[in-house]
C-alpha cells in the first residue's frame, strides 16, 4: 500500500464459451498489464475461466479438468509477479460441482470461495449445475498444484502425492494485519442479507464480487445502487467485476459491468457494451475505512468462530495513486451540489427558527461587515423570517465602521441591508475605541493585538446591548475555518447568542451565498453578492489605505483557506497524520501549490489548531450541518492544553525526509 491506499482492479476479459485455454491466455495477459500498472489485487468475472454461459457443458469432465489446468497455469504465472488475483471457475468437490472464486498470487493458492446463493428463476438455472456453499461438509479441498503434463494438454494426469489442502468455504476473510478482504459471487449481493455484511463485521475492508449479471432495461442502475449501498452500509470498498460482451449467447446479453466503490462513493467504472477488454483501476483508502469504523460504535466488529482467516502474502510496493483527490472536500460534487446546498441552508434556517420559536424572541441582531460570512448569516435570518412570517424589519443589521473599514465593504453592507428590507443601524466605533485606548493606556499608533481586538470586542458589546434593548438575540457570523484556526477574537466576534455559520467552512460559504442569491426576488441582490464574492477576505482591523482601501489580507497572514479546509477535513473527519494529509494534498493541489508552500501552511495550521482550542471549548450554540464540527457538545472534545509535539515532529520529518526531496520546487 502507498500511504494506506490499496490499488485494486476489476477486469473484463475477452472470453470464448467453454474455451479454457483461450480464456486463460486473456486473463494472463490482463494480470500482466495490471501488475505493470501497480495493481495489488485484481478481480475477474464469475466463471471467467470457462465462461458463465456453458450450460450443460458444466457436466463435462473435460471442461472441469481443463479449468483446473488453466488455474494451475495462472497460479504458476504469478510466481514472479507482485499481484493477488481472484478468478472464477467451476470446481468439483466430492461429487458436486461448485461455482467458486479462486484467490491466488505470487505462485500460491490462498483459498477457494464457493457461491452461496444460486439463482434459479427467469433466465437463470444455476441449481441445475451447481451446489450451494450451504451444502458443503467440511471446509477444505484437495487440489493439485503441480500437474504432470503429457503431450496432449487435455489428457493431464495428476499425481496423488502432490495434492494439497486449501480452504474451501464462503466464510473466509483473506489478508494480513493491515489489509483484509473477502469474496461474494453475483447473486450473493442481491439477497436480503448478503455475505459481505458478515465479512465486513469480521474485519474485511474490501469485498470483491465476481459476477455474470446479464443486461436488461433499467437493471444497470439497480445493480449500481446495490453495490454502492452495500459499500456504504459495510463502510468498505466494493469491487464489482461483471461479464462482458463475449459471454453473450442464445437469449441473453452481457454488457461488461465493472465498478469500484468506497463507502458508497463510486471511484471508477467501466464503459458498458464495449467490445474491447477493460481493466478498471482505482485506489481504495483503507485508512479512511478504518477511521470511519473506529468512530462508528454501531459497527461491532467481531471474528466469529465459524469464520476462517486465510493469510495472504501481500507484495510490498508503493505505486502512483491514480484516483482523483478533491481539493475541496467540504464542497458538494457538481452532480449533487444543488440538493446538498439546499440541505445545508435549510438546516441553518431550521436551527435558527427553532431557537426563535422556543424563546418567543422575534428580533435578530446581526453585525454586517460587507464580507461573505455576515452576508450568509443575514441570508439565513432573512429566510427564517420569511418562513416564520416575521417581518424582515425585525432583523436589525448593524454596520460598525472602524479604523480599517474600506469603502467597498461599507457600501456593500449598506446596499445589502437596504435591498433586503432589514432595519439598518450604523454605529461608528472609532471614538469609543479611542476612548478605550485612553482608559487602558494604549498608544493608538501601536497597531498590535490590543489595537485589533479592542475593535472586535467593541462591536460585540454594541450588538449585545442592542439585543438587550430590543429583546432580541445576537446572531453569530463566524465560520468553521476561523474557529479551527482561532482566527477570531476571544469574547469578541467569537461570541454570540446563536451562531448560524459555526459548521460552515470558508470554502463552502461562497458556494452557499452564490446559490441562494438566485432564490431572492430582489433585482439588485445578485450584483451586490458578486461584489462581495470578489472582495478579498479581511478582518479590516488595521487602518485602511488610500481611498479607504483594504490593507489587511487574512490569507496572506494565516494562509489559503482552501489548504486549511483540506487539512481540517482529514484531521477531524478521518484522523490522518500530517504525512498522509501532505501526500494527498500534493496530489489534490498539483500545479496550484508547491510542496514547500503546502508544508509551510500545514505547520501554521497545526500550531494554531492546537493552541486555540480554548476558544472552541466555550462556543455558543449553532446548527451542525456536516460530518465535521468543532462544537464541544458535538463532534469534537479536545483538551485545551493538548500538546502538538507529535504532529510537529511528523511535519519536521516531511521537511527533511528523502521521500520529499522535491521540496525545492
Image (spheres, grey):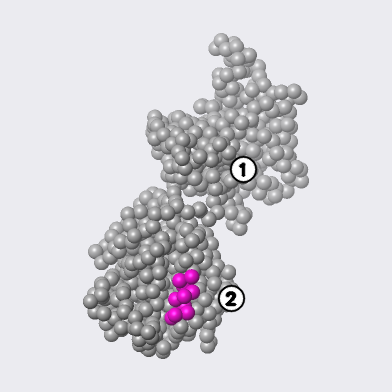
Q: Considering depth in this image, is 246 or 297 the residue closer to the camera?
A: 246
Number of other residues with Cα within 10 Å of mark 1, as a class: few under 14, some 14 to 19, many 20 or more? few
* Residue name at image x 49 percent, y 31 percent: 608
Looking at marks 1 and 2 on the same chain, the residue that comes earlier in the sequence is marked by 2
Q: Secondary structure at mark 1?
A: loop
Q: Considering depth in this image, is 244 or 518 the residue closer to the camera?
A: 244
* Residue name at image x 58 percent, y 45 percent: 589
Say which mark, if any, is on residue 275.
2
Which residues are drawn in magenta? 20-29
Residue 222 in magenta?
A: no
**In the depicted structure, whether residue 72 falls above or below residue 424:** below
Residue 269 location, quadrant: bottom right
Res 240 visible: no
**In the depicted structure, whether residue 458 falls above or below residue 324:** above
Q: Secondary structure at mark 2?
A: loop
Residue 99 location, quadrant: bottom left
Residue 46 location, quadrant: bottom left
Whole-Å distance between the Cαs marked 1 and 2? 39 Å
* Residue name at image x 44 percent, y 68 percent: 43
In percent of width and height, residue 200 lies at 36, 61
Residue 22 in magenta?
A: yes
In percent of width and height, residue 477 lies at 58, 36
Res 216 visible: yes
Say which mark, if any, is on residue 507.
none
* Residue name at image x 52 percent, y 65 percent: 280
Residue position marked by numbered label 1 in the rendering: 592
Amino acid at each position: 500500500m502507498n500511504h494506506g491506499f490499496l490499488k485494486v482492479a476489476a477486469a473484463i476479459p475477452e472470453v470464448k464459451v467453454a474455451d479454457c485455454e483461450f480464456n486463460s491466455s486473456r486473463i494472463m495477459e490482463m494480470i500482466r498489464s495490471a501488475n505493470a500498472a501497480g495493481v495489488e489485487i485484481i478481480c475477474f468475472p464469475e466463471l471467467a475461466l470457462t465462461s458463465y454461459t456453458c450450460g450443460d457443458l458444466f457436466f463435462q469432465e473435460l471442461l472441469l479438468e481443463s479449468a483446473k489446468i488453466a488455474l494451475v497455469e495462472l497460479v504458476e504465472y504469478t510466481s514472479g509477479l507482485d499481484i493477488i488475483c481472484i478468478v472464477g471457475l467451476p470446481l468439483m468437490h466430492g461429487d458436486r460441482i461448485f461455482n467458486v472464486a479462486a484467490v491466488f498470487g505470487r505462485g500460491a493458492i490462498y483459498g477457494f470461495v464457493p457461491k452461496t446463493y444460486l439463482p434459479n428463476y427467469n433466465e437463470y438455472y444455476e441449481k441445475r449445475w451447481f451446489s450451494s456453499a450451504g451444502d458443503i461438509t467440511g471446509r477444505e479441498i484437495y487440489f493439485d498444484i503441480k500437474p504432470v503434463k503429457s503431450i496432449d494438454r487435455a489428457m493431464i494426469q495428476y499425481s496423488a502425492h502432490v495434492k494439497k489442502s486449501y480452504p474451501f468455504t464462503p466464510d473466509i476473510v483473506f489478508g494480513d494485519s493491515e489489509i483484509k478482504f473477502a469474496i461474494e459471487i453475483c447473486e450473493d449481493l442481491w439477497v436480503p442479507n448478503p455475505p459481505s455484511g458478515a465479512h465486513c463485521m469480521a474485519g474485511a475492508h474490501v469485498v470483491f464480487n465476481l459476477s455474470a449479471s446479464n443486461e436488461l432495461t433499467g437493471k444497470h442502475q439497480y445493480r449500481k445502487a446495490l453495490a454502492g449501498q452495500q459499500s456504504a452500509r459495510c463502510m468498505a470498498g466494493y469491487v464489482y467485476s461483471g461479464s462482458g460482451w463475449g459471454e453473450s449467447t442464445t437469449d441473453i446479453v452481457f454488457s461488461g459491468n465493472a465498478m469500484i466503490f468506497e463507502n458508497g462513493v463510486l471511484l471508477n467504472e467501466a464503459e458498458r457494451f464495449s467490445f474491447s477488454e477493460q481493466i478498471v483501476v482505482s485506489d481504495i483508502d483503507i485508512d479512511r475505512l478504518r477511521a470511519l469504523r473506529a468512530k462508528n460504535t454501531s459497527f461491532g466488529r467481531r471474528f466469529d468462530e465459524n469464520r476462517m482467516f486465510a493469510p495472504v502474502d501481500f507484495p510490498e510496493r508503493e505505486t502512483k495513486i491514480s484516483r482523483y483527490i478533491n481539493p475541496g472536500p467540504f464542497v458538494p460534487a457538481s452532480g449533487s451540489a444543488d440538493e446538498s446546498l439546499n440541505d445545508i441552508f435549510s438546516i441553518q434556517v431550521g436551527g435558527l427558527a427553532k431557537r426563535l420559536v422556543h424563546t418567543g424572541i422575534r428580533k435578530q441582531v446581526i453585525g454586517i461587515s460587507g464580507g461573505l460570512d455576515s452576508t450568509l448569516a443575514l441570508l439565513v435570518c432573512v429566510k427564517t423570517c420569511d418562513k416564520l412570517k416575521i417581518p424582515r424589519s425585525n432583523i436589525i443589521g448593524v454596520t460598525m465602521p472602524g479604523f480599517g473599514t474600506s469603502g467597498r465593504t461599507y457600501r456593500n453592507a449598506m446596499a445589502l441591508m437596504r435591498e433586503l428590507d432589514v432595519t439598518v443601524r450604523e454605529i461608528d466605533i472609532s471614538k469609543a475605541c479611542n476612548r478605550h485606548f485612553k482608559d487602558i493606556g494604549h498608544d493608538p499608533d501601536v497597531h498590535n493585538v490590543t489595537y485589533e481586538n479592542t475593535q472586535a470586542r467593541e462591536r460585540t458589546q454594541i450588538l449585545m446591548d442592542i439585543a438587550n434593548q430590543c429583546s432580541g438575540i445576537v446572531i453569530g457570523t463566524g465560520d468553521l475555518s476561523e474557529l479551527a484556526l482561532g482566527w477570531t477574537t476571544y469574547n469578541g466576534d467569537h461570541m454570540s447568542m446563536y451562531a448560524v455559520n459555526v459548521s460552515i467552512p470558508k470554502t463552502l460559504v461562497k458556494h452557499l451565498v452564490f446559490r441562494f442569491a438566485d432564490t431572492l426576488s430582489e433585482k439588485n441582490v445578485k450584483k451586490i453578492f458578486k461584489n462581495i464574492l470578489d472582495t478579498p477576505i479581511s478582518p479590516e482591523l488595521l487602518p485602511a489605505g488610500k481611498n479607504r482601501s483594504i490593507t489587511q489580507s487574512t490569507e496572506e497572514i494565516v494562509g489559503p483557506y482552501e489548504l486549511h479546509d483540506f487539512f481540517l477535513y482529514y484531521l477531524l473527519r478521518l484522523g490522518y497524520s500530517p504525512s498522509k494529509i501532505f501526500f494527498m494534498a500534493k496530489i489534490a493541489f498539483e500545479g496550484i501549490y508547491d510542496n514547500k508552500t503546502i508544508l509551510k501552511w500545514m505547520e501554521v495550521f497545526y500550531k494554531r489548531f492546537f493552541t486555540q482550542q480554548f476558544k472552541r471549548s466555550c462556543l455558543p450554540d449553532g446548527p451542525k450541518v456536516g460530518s465535521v464540527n468543532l462544537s464541544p457538545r458535538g463532534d469534537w472534545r479536545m483538551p485545551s492544553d493538548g500538546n502538538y509535539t507529535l504532529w510537529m515532529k511528523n511535519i519536521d520529518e516531511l521537511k527533511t525526509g528523502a521521500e520529499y526531496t522535491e521540496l525545492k520546487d
